[in-house]
């Protein structure tokens, strides 16, 4: 092994080897074999790997590697989504930069251009996934517009239509006037913005010199008004209900109606009703059978339904003119500042418009009820369980799903129209003619719209496995084991997959849904380009110079002040850029942070700490190899375990049990903690030190040393397998060096079995004895550190121990205690023996004394004892307060109360001993 761990030297070469050997591909499709399948949430083909991707994909990879090594027939399905709106927006921008448009190019040429762009840039994110060690089955990589997947999408549409669950309907939708397409309610981002509320005078038709004042934030839509509404119980307007007003700037009169929708406390208590351009107004219009008047084109330009003067004006230009004309007509009462919620398309940021159009819809009521019942019946479980409420809330209030989009990039809706606009549905024109027995004389034209991206995404768990065909993959791996995803797409995706999975497959698509938190920066802020706090996972792996990091963070920002602010903040936070940490350290950081909270703060300090952990593992492995290669190693039949050997084997078995339990419960953070503590503290800090002492001890036989080498290697090899799902690269590299010494055959660590628990190897006596030894060593080291005694100084130690068992155990372990604590001598004292002036410590019930003369500052020792006394006094007061609370004692679990009571007694004893030591110190100070 190289002296220094260098991730860059091993990672990409190793991954290429894994992929070329098809280690990620299932070995069988036998449906009777225990299977484990995850489908990756398909990232958009338009994107690159961000922190959320890296976090979730790491957790999925840990699960997949864990189950693969545990013997399950494992498949991780990978693929990308065509991302209709995002992809089309990118290609259209390219065309605009070239001075042309998609309309000028034509549909077929535009699609060819989009396909070429996808082929050129679509592999970016999959290459980044490889850099993170993601062990997906690349031989089954899917794209949502591949021919096989497209066939599944068209088949699903046709079945839903034939079953009466898809229909055409005219309704208000969220409309993007830039992209000129409907947008899902779930893709609307409401942005707070400073605006105004306008109080407009509408003259009464029967009394032109009198007015009713309406409050509105959108005066430009008054041309679409068909009524004015007041609350039926508002006494101010009772005599006006049923009367008419003259609609300003027009020659129309509109009626005053009463509706509970109106809030009498808001504005003037009067609102204009514009059913074609407001969702709430649309509902009011339907209740009162009001006409619906559309005043916009699909580009949000005022159309022929408004007075000639205003026709052709863009909506915000129209607002300015309407305000000016109303002012001139003295029809504005007042204009007040008002905070607005501006609806924007999360893709592109265009301000959306409620717009009345004919669209395709899926009836969701029955499917939603089935999806609700499946979770209520525990066919699918959410982890953490509290996200079930979010899932229920959306499905219980679900509306029919608008699935059509006025785009060209995507799955074109398989509906055809004849000259009379009669609809025929089938996956191709030829199949439609065959299905409906249509002659060639009937001319058909296909619907121009494409399907909402989430329609195809809802088919992902089974369409990726070959549906609608009955494939071995579908038989073996559906339903999948778990979906790992964020809480932000429970509505978008999780619920819709549940509905479609139950409808088309008759089974839930996944047995568990593990909801991750959202990765934020170290201050808890969401990572975003405009905040300048985005971290690229690959930059954390490879490192990045400060100038390049600044350039990445400020690229594309239009405002110079924003660029300058982000540059200053970045240079302050990363004066020298970001150091390379390697993939394993990043993956371990992700797992360690994976609590079951909503938000997860990514701390670069943790990343640095886990890079150090990689170094620790590397250096420990080099030590083991240096002390085992070319030397005698005991066979399995000739192993004779020392106390230290039995202790580390016991700790290993406990760790195996903990890690397996934590992985099974999706507690990646706790699994990481168990692994870290075992490898760093138990194995590296303690057992390697034990083994150094024993291997250098001339009194230990060669056979015993061969046994120690065997345990050194076997515990390291087990540790590597335990760590492998989280840290695949470093563990594979070290394992390749270790496995020949143990005679292991597989070519890769991932072909080895994950360690199994065997409680027979857990020896409580060994754990107890070594624990006592450790506590004594740590107590001596603590005194040495607090008293600032040089590490090279050998110390005399006096021990007072009334417990004969503990004394016997320590006596037996002097061979380890003396070198570990760096002692010159050990002197046993009887309980009543006088103690020379000494620094005191406690290890369990064992009292430890290091003579002070020539070693320490006695004033400092007194200060230390006083500090310890204050600490234990505070702990005692806390315990006494808690135990004196009758409500706590009655309601808390009995084992918790007993533990608190035992802690109280232990602290009382400790405090008493510390007080005695302080008293003795004070009495003997003059003798030093």
Image: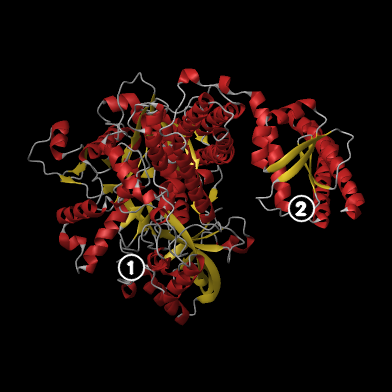
Identify the residue shown where x is 19% and y is 42%.
Answer: 416
2 vs 1, front mark: 2
Spatial distance from mark 2 to mark 1, Cα to Cα? 91 Å
* Closest to the observer, 884 or 339: 884
Q: Is residue 779 above or below residue 901?
A: below
Identify the residue shown where x is 50% and y is 49%.
Answer: 612
Q: Report x, y in % for residue 250.
A: 39, 71
Q: Read off the residue under disc 1.
A: 302
Numbered badge on residue 310: none
Q: Secondary structure at mark 2?
A: loop
Residue 896 occupies quadrant: top right
Task: State left or right for residue 238 relative to residue 886.
Answer: left
Q: Secondary structure at mark 1?
A: loop
Q: Is residue 508 visible?
A: no
Q: Report x, y in % for residue 644.
A: 60, 30
Sequence-wise, the earlier of marks 2 and 1 is 1
Image quadrant occupied by the N terminus: top left
Residue at the left extreme of this rendering: 441
Tell me if mark 2 has few (under 14), some (14-19) or many (20+) residues whose alpha carbon lies within 10 angstroms of its own.
some
Q: Is residue 599 visible?
A: yes
* Closest to the observer, 3 or 125: 3
Numbered badge on residue 855: 2
Identify the residue shown where x is 66% and y is 50%.
Answer: 791
Residue 69 occupies quadrant: top left
Q: Report x, y in % for residue 627.
A: 47, 36
């Amino acid at each position: 092994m190289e002296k220094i761990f260098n991730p860059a030297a091993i990672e990409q070469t190793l991954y290429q080897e894994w992929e070329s050997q098809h280690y990620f591909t299932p070995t069988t499709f036998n449906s009777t074999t225990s299977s484990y399948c995850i489908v990756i949430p398909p990232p958009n083909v338009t994107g690159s790997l961000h922190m959320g991707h890296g976090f979730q994909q790491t957790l999925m990879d840990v699960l997949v590697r864990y189950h693969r090594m545990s013997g399950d027939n494992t498949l991780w399905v990978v693929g990308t989504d065509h991302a209709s709106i995002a992809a089309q927006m990118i290609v259209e921008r390219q065309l605009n930069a070239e001075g042309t448009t998609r309309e000028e190019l034509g549909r077929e040429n535009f699609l060819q251009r989009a396909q070429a762009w996808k082929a050129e840039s679509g592999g970016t994110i999959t290459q980044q996934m490889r850099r993170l060690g993601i062990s997906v089955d690349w031989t089954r990589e899917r794209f949502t517009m591949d021919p096989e997947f497209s066939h599944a999408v068209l088949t699903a549409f046709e079945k839903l239509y034939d079953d009466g669950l898809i229909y055409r309907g005219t309704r208000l939708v969220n409309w993007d006037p830039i992209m000129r397409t409907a947008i899902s309610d779930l893709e609307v981002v409401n942005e707070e913005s400073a605006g105004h509320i306008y109080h407009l005078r509408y003259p009464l038709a029967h009394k032109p010199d009198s007015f009713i004042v309406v409050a509105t934030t959108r005066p430009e839509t008054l041309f679409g008004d068909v009524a004015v509404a007041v609350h039926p119980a508002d006494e101010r307007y009772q005599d006006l209900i049923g009367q008419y007003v003259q609609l300003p700037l027009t020659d129309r009169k509109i009626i005053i109606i009463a509706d509970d929708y109106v809030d009498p406390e808001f504005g003037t208590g009067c609102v204009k009703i514009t059913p074609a351009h407001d969702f709430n107004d649309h509902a009011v219009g339907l209740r009162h059978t009001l006409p619906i008047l559309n005043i916009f084109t699909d580009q949000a330009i005022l159309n022929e339904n408004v007075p000639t003067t205003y026709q052709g004006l863009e909506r915000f230009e129209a607002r300015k003119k309407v305000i000016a004309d109303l002012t001139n007509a003295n029809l504005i009462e007042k204009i007040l500042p008002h905070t607005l919620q501006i609806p924007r398309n999360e893709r592109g940021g265009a301000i959306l418009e409620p717009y009345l159009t004919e669209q395709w819809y899926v009836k969701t009521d029955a499917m939603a009820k089935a999806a609700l019942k499946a979770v209520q019946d525990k066919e699918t479980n959410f982890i953490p369980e509290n996200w079930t409420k979010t899932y229920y809330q959306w499905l219980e209030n679900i509306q029919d799903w608008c699935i059509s989009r006025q785009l060209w990039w995507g799955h074109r809706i398989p509906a055809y129209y004849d000259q009379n606009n009669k609809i025929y549905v089938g996956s191709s024109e030829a199949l439609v003619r065959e299905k409906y027995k249509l002659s060639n004389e009937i001319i058909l034209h296909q619907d121009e719209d494409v399907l909402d991206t989430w329609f195809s995404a809802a088919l992902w768990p089974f369409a990726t496995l070959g549906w609608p065909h009955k494939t071995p993959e579908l038989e073996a791996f559906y339903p999948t084991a778990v979906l790992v995803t964020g809480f932000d797409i429970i509505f978008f995706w999780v619920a819709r997959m549940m509905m479609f999975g139950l409808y088309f497959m008759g089974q839930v698509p996944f047995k568990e849904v593990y909801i991750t938190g959202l990765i934020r920066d170290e201050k808890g802020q969401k990572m975003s380009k405009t905040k300048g706090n985005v971290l690229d996972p690959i930059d954390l792996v490879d490192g990045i110079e400060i100038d390049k990091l600044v350039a990445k963070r400020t690229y594309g920002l239009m405002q110079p002040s924003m660029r300058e602010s982000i540059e200053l903040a970045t240079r302050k936070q990363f004066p020298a850029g970001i150091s390379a940490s390697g993939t394993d350290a990043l993956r371990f950081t992700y797992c360690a942070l994976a609590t079951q909270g909503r938000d997860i703060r990514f701390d670069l300090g943790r990343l640095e700490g886990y890079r150090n952990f990689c170094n620790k593992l590397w250096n420990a492995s080099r030590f083991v190899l240096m002390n085992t290669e070319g030397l005698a190693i005991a066979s399995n039949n000739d192993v004779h375990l020392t106390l230290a050997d039995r202790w580390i084997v016991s700790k290993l078995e406990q760790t195996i049990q903990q890690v397996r339990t934590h992985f099974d419960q999706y507690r990646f953070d706790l699994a990481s903690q168990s692994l870290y503590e075992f490898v760093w503290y138990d194995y590296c800090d303690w057992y390697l030190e034990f083994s150094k002492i024993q291997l250098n001890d001339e009194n230990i036989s060669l056979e015993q040393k061969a046994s120690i080498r065997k345990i050194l290697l076997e515990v390291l090899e087990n540790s590597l397998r335990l760590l492998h799902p989280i840290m695949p690269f470093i563990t594979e590299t070290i394992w390749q060096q270790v496995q020949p010494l143990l005679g292991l055959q597989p070519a890769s660590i991932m072909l080895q079995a994950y360690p199994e628990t065997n409680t027979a190897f857990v020896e409580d006596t060994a754990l107890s004895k070594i624990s006592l030894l450790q506590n004594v060593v740590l107590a001596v080291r603590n005194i040495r550190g607090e008293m600032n005694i040089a590490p090279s100084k050998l110390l005399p130690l006096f021990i007072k121990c009334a417990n004969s068992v503990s004394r016997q155990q320590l006596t037996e372990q002097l061979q380890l205690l003396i070198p570990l604590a760096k002692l010159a001598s050990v002197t046993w004292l009887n309980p009543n023996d006088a103690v020379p002036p000494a620094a005191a410590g406690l290890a369990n019930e064992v009292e430890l004394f290091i003579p002070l003369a020539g070693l320490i500052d006695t004033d400092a020792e007194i200060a230390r004892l006083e500090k310890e006394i204050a600490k234990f006094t505070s702990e005692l007061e806390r315990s006494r307060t808690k135990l004196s609370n009758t409500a706590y004692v009655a309601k808390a679990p009995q084992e918790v109360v007993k533990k608190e009571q035992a802690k109280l007694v232990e602290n009382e004893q400790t405090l008493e001993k510390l007080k005695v030591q302080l008293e003795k110190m004070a009495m003997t100070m003059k003798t030093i």
